[in-house]
Image (tube, coloured by chain):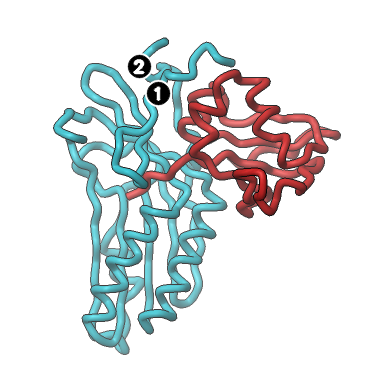
Amino acid sequence: MASPKAPAGHFSILYFASASTFTNKTSEYLSAPVEARGLFSKLEELYPGINDKVLNSCAVTVNLSYIEIDGDEAPDLKIVIKEGDEVAIIPPVSSG
Amino acid sequence: MSTTEPPTYKPDIPSEPVTQTTENIHIELTPHALDSLAATRFVRSPSAGATVLFIGTTRDTFNDLPVSSLAYTSYAPLALSTLHNIATTLLAKHALTRIAIIHKLGECPIGEESIVIAVSAPHRQAAWRAGEEALEETKKRAEIWKLERFEGGDGVWRANRDGVMGVRVGEGEGAA
């Protein structure tokens, strides 16, 4: 979980619960920089079908802060995910 | 498409408890058995006339289907911060004396404690209310996920939000 630092030119992305099941990974490195608006399409390229099955119901964090990238008017679409950032895909939670 | 969880699936969990503790707030995510007495001791105070303790244990069924085992995984740094935020808010809102929220990570045998919440306040009403709110907020927001494995082998990620079945483990296999 405390993933080691991403290699140069990359950010880390963490997958939890259904996202981890779908990708068969708990984390990986992807090349940076990437605009937040392009994140889900990048993941769809890597994991066809992930948008509909998983990402539609997920939230996203960058460096432990939630970003809002759902819909064309979302405020954080222009955020740039930079080298060394930690991104996480957060499916609906189920503690308790 | 397989309907069983990969046999290799291992929740990514810390081997030791992770905690965030201040004078009035104790937050803990732990792979060990939960200690409700320790939570009670943390919140007990001469200025508090009421202590409320909630213990959540894992059930052996979901929608009448027999559950054979359960495991919790978490984005620990974010969950700690979310739980601390919930505790801070409730402390102020209900003028609590102290609050502790402790959640299990990793395998949780059926019938054992998965969450312990203890709150103390000068008077009982605030303690009751805050205890309930702490649980509801935790279930709604804490970045913790429950994998239920049903007898017969299917594994399902639960979602608290809608009470529906959640996502069946194995649905995405072969996609990567």
In-front residue for pair A3/B89: B89
Q: CA distance from mark 1 to mark 2?
A: 6 Å
- The structure residue drawn at horizontal position 24% and vertical position 62%, both measured from the top left corner, is B54
Residue placed at 35% from the left, 71% from the top?
A: B42
Tell me the SS state at disc 1: loop
Taking the image as shown, residue A21 lies to the left or right of residue A63, namely: left
Q: Are marks 1 and 2 in contact (CB under 8 Å)?
A: yes
Given the image, what chain letter belongs to the residue carrying mark 1? B
Residue lying farthest to the front in this orientation? A72
Q: Is residue B104 above or below residue B94?
A: above
Please tell me the numbered disc located at residue B4. Answer: 2
Label 1 in the same subunit as label 2: yes
User: x, y percentage for residue B136?
Assistant: 33, 59
In the rendered view, tell whether residue B81 sits above or below residue B13. below
Task: Determine which quarter of the picture holds residue B24.
Answer: bottom left
Determine whether the residue tagged by mark 2 lies in a helix, strand or loop. Answer: loop
The tint of chain A in the picture is red
Q: Colour of chain B?
A: cyan
- Left/right of residue A24 with respect to residue A72 in the rendered view: left
How far from the left and from the top, in percent, is residue B153? 28, 18
Q: Report the side of B26 relative to A20 (left or right).
A: left
Q: Amino acid at mark 1?
A: Val
In the picture, the quarter occupied by the N terminus of chain A is: top right
Query: Which of the 4 image quarters holds residue A7?
Result: top right
Splitting the image into 4 quarters, where does residue A71 fall?
top right
Question: Is disc 1 surrounded by few (<14), some (14 to 19) or many (20+) residues within 10 Å?
Answer: many
Which residue is disc 1 drawn over? B169
Residue at 79% across / 30% down in the picture? A31
- Between residues A3 and B91, which one lies in front from this camera angle? B91
Q: Amino acid at mark 2?
A: Thr
What x and y, as percent, mark residue A11? 75, 37
Picture coordinates of residue A96 (x, y %)? Answer: 32, 50
